[in-house]
Amino acid sequence: MPEKILEMKNLIKTYIMGDEEQVVLKGIDLEINRGDFLSVLGPSGSGKSTLMNIIGCLDVPTSGTYYLSGELIRDLPEVDLSHIRNREIGFIFQQFQLLPRLSAQKNVELPLIYAGVPEKERQARSAHILERVGLADKMNNRPNQLSGGQQQRVAIARALVTEPTILLADEPTGALDQQTGQQIMALFKELYQEGKTIVMITHDADVAKNGSRIVRIVDGNLSEGVYNA
Amino acid sequence: MLKESIKMALENIVSNKMRSFLTMLGIIIGVGSVIALITIVSGATSTVTDQVASMGANTVTVQVQGTPLKQGLTQGDVNKIAELSNISGIAPTISGQTSVAFEGNTMDEITLQGKNDVYFENTEDVISSGRIIKSIDTENESRVALIGNDIVNELYVGKNPIGQEIKIGGITYNVIGILQESDSFSSTDTNSSVIIPYTTAMGVVGAKYINSMTVYIADEALADTTTRQIEGVLTKAFNGDEDGYTIVNMQSILETIEEMTSILSMMLAGIASISLVVGGIGIMNMMLVSVTERTSEIGLRKALGAEPKQIQLQFLIESVVLCLIGGIIGFILGVSLAWVVANLIGTSFALTASTVLLAIGFSAAIGVVFGFMPARKASRLNPIDALRSV
Ligand SMILES: Nc1ncnc2c1ncn2[C@@H]1O[C@H](COP(=O)(O)OP(=O)(O)OP(=O)(O)O)[C@@H](O)[C@H]1O
Ligand SMILES: [Mg+2]
């Protein structure tokens, strides 16, 4: 019996621009089980990032329900949402979003600082996870001393280090050349095999194929399973 | 968390050296000028009060103008004051004009002063050679005199005047000492003066009144009470006419000086702190720029789980660290400036712990006050908007 860790029911997100209302997500129903590697595929402007923001608890739905690890995510105070993000979500961004002044290891330690993990443990855990993504010898490098692929590995290590419920990646290969992108995808697959839950957003059908499940989002509507390139 | 924030703040300041320095300049100048002013004024104050205190913080001076009925104090009045408690001694002074003569040579327009042993015991460097007037001279109305340098040079050419006779106002005295030479800065010209026991001036010369006196107080803490008691005796002596005398309590002069200079230094510091406010606005400006520049960093930190409070704290720490560094530089510059000025004008230089605390406290407070708004702005950024601004 698979463990359900995410459940969305009739989720609607509406943006109000001036006096015009734009419905970006039009009633999304989605369930994710532990260990899924879900690709969310869709064209530009379809609402992928909007959905990702809601999954990542950076935003809340206009209506409908969203349960993450059994907890109802709604219009909570910012401080509560920040705790949920820290505990449940590991973000991986298209542009890596590493802090340029910090070493790779310090970047990885960042979410642990906000989790209140003591320094010794932070160092041990960040070193361990950097080793896991193949950067044992680059821990003291700053982002500008790393290649794009290495930077994305640091970002992945940062997402993994808190052992979140979901790894949430928005176009993780979008800023990389094809070969490096494939290496990153190989790492994602390894993580999937280790049992990590991954949600990956992409507009690239080839990249989406790496997932164990694919959902398509078109114009704010989500449909499962059928894959046609 | 705090340690991390301070480290990050320092890294940020170092990575923007030029801009950080320019921003700090306002704080440096502000703190520097406030500290320099306070240190200089307090050094000058302590020099002035030391000088006043060396004149005797434990003294009450009475100047007698006299009334038409009674031109000065009598020995009886002085005795009454001497009987008061908390008085360690009284030095009366009688002043007049006279002429002196030795071996047929005469000098006119000589200042004659009658004093007693108490005066000499409490005053340094009155004579350059010989001996001072002792209590036995006062008791016996001895005919002994201390003479000034001009008199020595004119009447005793080639002779040691000590042990010689001198005629003062026609009466013969024994010269027992020579007065310290006075220069143009001295408050009294002793070069053409003679000093004799005041009792001799009354008994032998015939002076009726004492023109002024210095009363020495045993316990300074009770100076005010004793001053009032002296005033009581004086009022009675002049039949209630308060115009007959002026009474000055050194302790109260000291207090007045200290009060005035502390008001002065507060005023100066107040003016200088305007530059601190300007410096603070500079800090606020830099912090606002920094928040805008680092929007995506703020968004990322929020995505990674930073609470708004933690973001706010981070920026607040940055502004406080910036101000503290500026404050420390300003403090060092201000103290150096004060030291140079104190050496130039010859006042004392003292660095108090409260000045150090003031500098540190002030700069930290400016960091908090002017960093608050930018920090709050950072903490309120919407993470989605912040992340998008790559
Ligand atoms: N804050 C907002 N206010 C108003 N409209 C918004 C806002 N954010 C997104 N939208 C609109 O919602 C729609 C979906 O945007 P979204 O960013 O989710 O698309 P996307 O699928 O991620 O596209 P892309 O592949 O280009 O990143 C777009 O039409 C966009 O203009
Ligand atoms: Mg998008």
Image: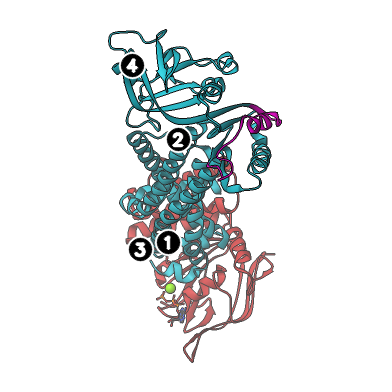
The residue that mark 1 highlights is: B284
State whether discs 2 and 4 lie on one chain.
yes
Above or below, B26 against B383 in this view is above
Which chain is indicated by disc 1?
B
**Is label 2 within 8 A of ligand 1 (CB to nearest ligand atom)?**
no
For residue B152, which numbered disc appears in the image? 4
Q: Where does the magenta region start and end?
A: B65-88
Viewport quadrant of the C terminus of chain A: bottom left
Q: Along the line of sight, which residue is nearer the eye, B314 or A48? A: B314
- On whether disc 3 and disc 2 are found on a single subunit, the reply is no
Distance of label 2 from label 4 (alpha carbons): 36 Å
Viewer-nearest residue: A117 or B114: B114
Residue type pointed to by label 3: Ala
Do circles 4 and 3 both sit on a common chain?
A: no
Sort mark 4 into few (<14), some (14-19) or many (20+) by Cα contacts within 10 Å. Answer: some
Above or below: residue B212 compared with residue B360: above
Q: CA distance from mark 1 to mark 3?
A: 36 Å
Q: Indicate the quadrant where residue A152 lies.
A: bottom left
Question: Quarter-wise, where is residue B390 in the image?
Answer: bottom left
Q: What residue did someone put label 2 on? A: B47
Display colour for chain A: red
